[in-house]
Image (cartoon, rainbow, N blue to C red):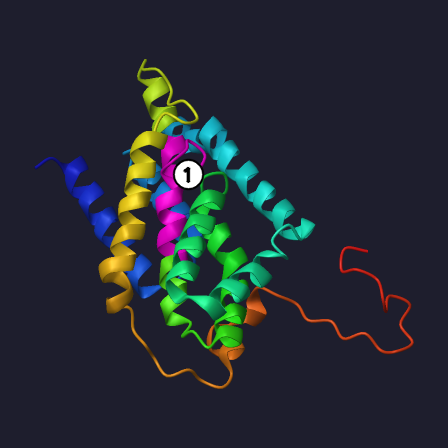
């Protein structure tokens, strides 16, 4: 084993320890690793900073802007009402619709952003329909992950792989090139959740304050209007 390989292995072990211990944020750890690789000579400064000028990195940043725009527009405001209506009729139907919804959004948005957007809605639906939140939150996450593999921009990993392939002289991955396989995985994932997965999901006793338990305050803001406020009677958008 060469000295360079040993240094890389030590850095990898250190990185895993920092990720597991959560002593620093993920972004801080990433910068630390990048600096260590350059200081030890494993990477040149040009190679170390190449990621910041990569088109894939810029594309991922733009995806977060799109996600924020969808959240600000209130486009998902009607989703909760639909899920509440379905939840009162059938849990299975709600599970299918929830996974299809999160998967469809995740195909064109970052999957983490999709879960962050829909989680408060799902928790509210669980309260109104008496469905245990643990029975809906995991399908929400799985749906977002499975939907992300259907398109090039569905997950940052696809974009990065496409960029690497292009640098190696191969054709870049097209927008819907992975859709056939991705849709098959999506269908299998939903089928698994219907037959096996929902039976394995924990059925925890609901606590009185679900908003506090799932830290909803991190994702939503509540405003109380006094009777004399000029915005009484207007829409949220206005």
Helix, strand or loop for disc 1 = helix
Residue 150 visible (yes or no): yes
List the single residue furthest toward the front: 89
Asked whether, in this view, residue 129 is left or right of residue 201, the answer is right
User: Nearest the camera: 203 or 117?
Assistant: 203
The secondary structure that most of the magenta stretch takes on is helix
Q: Find the magenta span and give its range.
A: 140-160
Q: How many marks?
A: 1
Quadrant of the frame with the N terminus: top left
Q: Residues within 10 Å of mark 1 (few under 14, many from 20)?
A: many
Residue at image x 35%, y 45%? 146
Quadrant of the frame with the C terminus: bottom right
Residue 189 screen position, x and y as percent? 29, 49
Residue at image x 67%, y 53%? 74
Residue at image x 32%, y 51%? 190
Residue at image x 49%, y 63%? 86
Up/down of 64 relative to 202, above or below: above
User: Nearest the camera: 11 or 228?
Assistant: 228
Residue 122 screen position, x and y as percent? 49, 65
List the single residue furthest toward the top: 169
Where is mark 1, residue-wise? 156
- Quadrant in the picture for residue 133: bottom left
Residue 81 screen position, x and y as percent? 59, 62
Residue 11 screen position, x and y as percent? 25, 47
List the single residue furthest toward the bottom: 208
């Amino acid at each position: 084993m060469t000295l360079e390989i040993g240094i890389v292995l030590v850095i990898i072990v250190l990185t895993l320890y920092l990720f597991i211990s959560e002593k620093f944020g993920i972004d801080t750890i990433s910068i630390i690793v990048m600096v260590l690789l350059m200081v030890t000579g494993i990477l040149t400064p040009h190679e170390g900073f190449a990621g910041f000028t990569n088109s894939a990195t810029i594309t991922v940043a733009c995806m977060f802007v799109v996600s924020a725009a969808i959240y600000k527009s209130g486009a998902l405001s009607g989703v909760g009402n639909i899920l509440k209506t379905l939840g009162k009729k059938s849990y299975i139907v709600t599970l299918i619709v929830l996974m299809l919804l999160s998967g469809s959004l995740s195909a064109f948005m970052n999957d983490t952003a999709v879960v962050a957007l829909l989680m408060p809605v799902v928790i509210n639906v669980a309260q109104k329909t008496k469905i245990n939140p643990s029975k809906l939150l995991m399908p929400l996450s799985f749906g977002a992950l499975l939907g992300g593999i259907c398109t090039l921009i569905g997950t940052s990993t696809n974009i990065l792989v496409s960029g690497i392939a292009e640098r190696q002289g191969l054709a870049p991955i097209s927008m819907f090139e992975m859709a056939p396989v991705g849709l098959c995985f999506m269908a299998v994932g939903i089928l698994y959740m219907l037959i096996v997965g929902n039976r394995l999901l924990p059925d925890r006793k609901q606590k009185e304050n679900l908003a506090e338990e799932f830290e909803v305050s991190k994702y939503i803001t509540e405003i109380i209007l006094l009777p004399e406020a000029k915005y009484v009677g207007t829409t949220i958008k206005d």
